[in-house]
Amino acid sequence: MFTLLAVLVMTKIPGLSRLSILLGLVVGTVAALIVGKTDFDGVADASVVAVPTPFAFGSPIFAIGAIVSMTIVILVIMVETTADILAVGEVVGTDVDSKRVGDGLRADMVSSAVAPIFNTFPATAFAQNVGLVAMTGIKSRFVVAMGGGVLALLGLSPILAAVVGVVPLPVLGGAGIALFGTVAASGIRTLGKVNYDNNSNVVIVAVTLAFGLIPVVASDFWDEFPDWFVTIFHSGISAASIVAVVLNVFFNVFKPGTPPNPSVVAAGPAVMVREDEARILREGGSLPDKAEPDKAVPNKDT
């Protein structure tokens, strides 16, 4: 909470707002150091420079079960990466077409193919970085490339990595509250542009949000399902993405059989009703298809 407070205060200060996350981490770490919540044991034992040894755990082994499991995991990662790419496009105010999404996924998968050679994990996009772009307002790709260079240096210097590892988890969590909140806000802004009139989009959004929240509010909800199913739907992002795509195809692509006003759970906006039409409705009658807009007045009963 102290770290979050520091981030919020510095966001308000001109000249510091774009560094609020970084400075908040520094302030939070110093506060944790004062109260004895940091651990420097790993720093003293770390070397200054170290080059990773390829295939340090042995030669690759190809097993069908592992291949199938990893294929599912990679598909989930690709869904999450796609969502992050779209969110970044929304934050920076640029169009994200299929080509740009494809380029991002190819870069992600090349990294995932190279990473195991150097004994690390497949790459995945982090939603925190989307929030970081939104909060700092820094949208330059050159800054991102410079950040990649810094990460490469950290990867070759165990002592620098150990220093970064000193930051306590509660400090990271305090900054994370603001970062994840901006991701959610970006999604809400995107949903605000959707047309909900005379369609089932509100149903799609409602069911999608529900599936996305299931792993959060009931972590054991899918435990009785097959392992491959749990792997996919235990991630709220992948579950919501899959459900949104399937429901969109069902309601908005396959049009046959769709009623004129299919969304039964959508709340209609306030309407202008003529006094004579209001009387007809109160008496149980029906209105003509089109009203005369020049005679429309607000419904006095409303």
Image: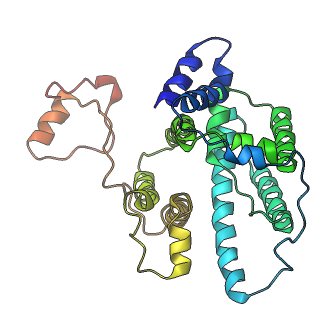
Give the quarter of the image for residue 237: bottom right
Q: Residue 96's spot in the image, x, y percent?
A: 72, 45
Which colour style is shown? rainbow
| Front residue of 266 and 87 | 87
Along the line of sight, the residue nearer the viewer: 41 or 182: 41
Quarter location, residue 280: top left
Of 180 and 171, nearer the camera is 171
Q: Is residue 126 above or below residue 210?
A: above
Q: Residue furthest bottom?
A: 64
Report how many numbered discs are placed on residues in the image: 0
Q: Quadrant of the C terminus?
A: top left
- Residue 259 position in % (x across, y down): 38, 61
- Residue at 27%, 44% in the rendered image: 288
| Residue at the image point whose x is 69% and y is 75% from the top | 70
Q: Position of residue 103 (x, y in %)?
A: 82, 54
Relative placement, left or right, of 76 versus 150 is left
The answer to whether 102 is drawn above or below residue 145 in the figure is below
**Residue 189 or residue 75, whichever sits in front:** 75
Residue 202 screen position, x and y as percent: 41, 51
